[in-house]
Image (cartoon, rainbow, N blue to C red):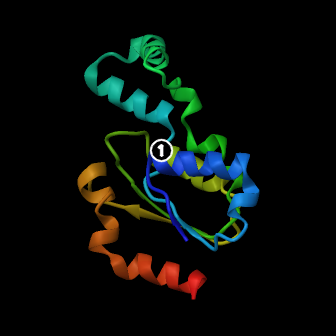
Amino acid sequence: GLFSQCLGGISQYAAITKHPQLFENVLCMCSPMVPNMPAVFEAFSELQGISQYQELIDLELIKMGGFPAADMAGELWASAVKMPVLMWQVLEDSWTKNPEDAQKTFDLLSSEEKELVWIENTPRRFKDGYNYFGRYPEKVIPFFDKYMK
C-alpha cells in the first residue's frame, strides 16, 4: 500500500499516469490532503491581498525551476488511480478552496472503492489535517488491513 500525502499525492498520481505498470501490484493507497495548487495559490494569495499577481507568482515558480500552479494539480492525473483509495481533507481548509477543490479530485479518481473523510469544525490543514492518521489510526489501519492482508 501507498501513503501519498499532499504534494506527494500529486506526484504519485502523475507517476501512476506515466508508468502504470510500476503500480500493478500496489493494492491500495491512502491519499490524504492532496490539493490542486491553483486553489492553494488562490486561497493563499487572497489571504495576502495579492491575488491579482498569480501570473507573476507562476513566473517566479518557473524561474526557480518549478512549475506553474496549473501544472501542480491532483485533478490532472487522478483518473489514472484505479486502486482502492482512502482520502481525508479539511472541509474548511484555509489553505485551499474546499470542499469543491478536494471533492473534484476525489470524484475524478477511477477507483471503484474509494472513501473521502471530511475533517470538520476546523480550518487548520497542518494541525488537524496532517495529524489525522496519528489521532485516528482506527480509521486508517483497518483500510490498509482490508486490502493488504
Is residue 98 visible in this depiction of the protein? yes
In the displayed structure, 147 sits above or below 48; it is below
Report how many numbered discs are placed on residues in the image: 1
Q: Is residue 134 left or right of residue 17?
A: left
Q: As rendered, which of 9 and 95 lies closer to the eye? A: 9
Which amino acid lies under the numbered mark 1 shown in the image of this protein?
Pro
Residue farthest along the front direction in this orientation = 22
Name the quadrant containing residue 121.
bottom left
Residue 112: image x %, image y %? 71, 69
Name the quadrant containing residue 120.
bottom left
Q: Is residue 70 left or right of residue 124?
A: right
In the displayed structure, 92 sits above or below 72; it is below
Residue at screen point 34% across, 69% down = 133
Residue farthest along the left direction in this orientation = 127
Q: Is residue 119 left or right of residue 62?
A: left
Q: As rendered, which of 68 and 46 lies closer to the eye? A: 68
Near mark 1 (Cα within 10 A), the count class, few <14, some 14-19 or many ≥20, is many
Please state, as top left, top right, bottom left or bottom right, where the C terminus lies in the image.
Answer: bottom right
Residue 50: image x %, image y %? 33, 15
Q: Is residue 118 left or right of residue 12?
A: left
Residue at screen point 60% across, 71% down = 28
Is residue 100 visible in this depiction of the protein? no
Residue at screen point 59% across, 47% down = 104
Q: Secondary structure at mark 1?
A: loop
Name the quadrant containing residue 81.
bottom right
Residue at screen point 42% across, 62% down = 118
Residue farthest along the bottom direction in this orientation = 149
Please state, as top left, top right, bottom left or bottom right, where the N terminus lies in the image.
Answer: bottom right
Which residue in the structure is indicated by mark 1?
35
Residue 57: image x %, image y %? 42, 16
In the displayed structure, 130 sits above or below 144; it is above
Residue 32: image x %, image y %? 45, 58
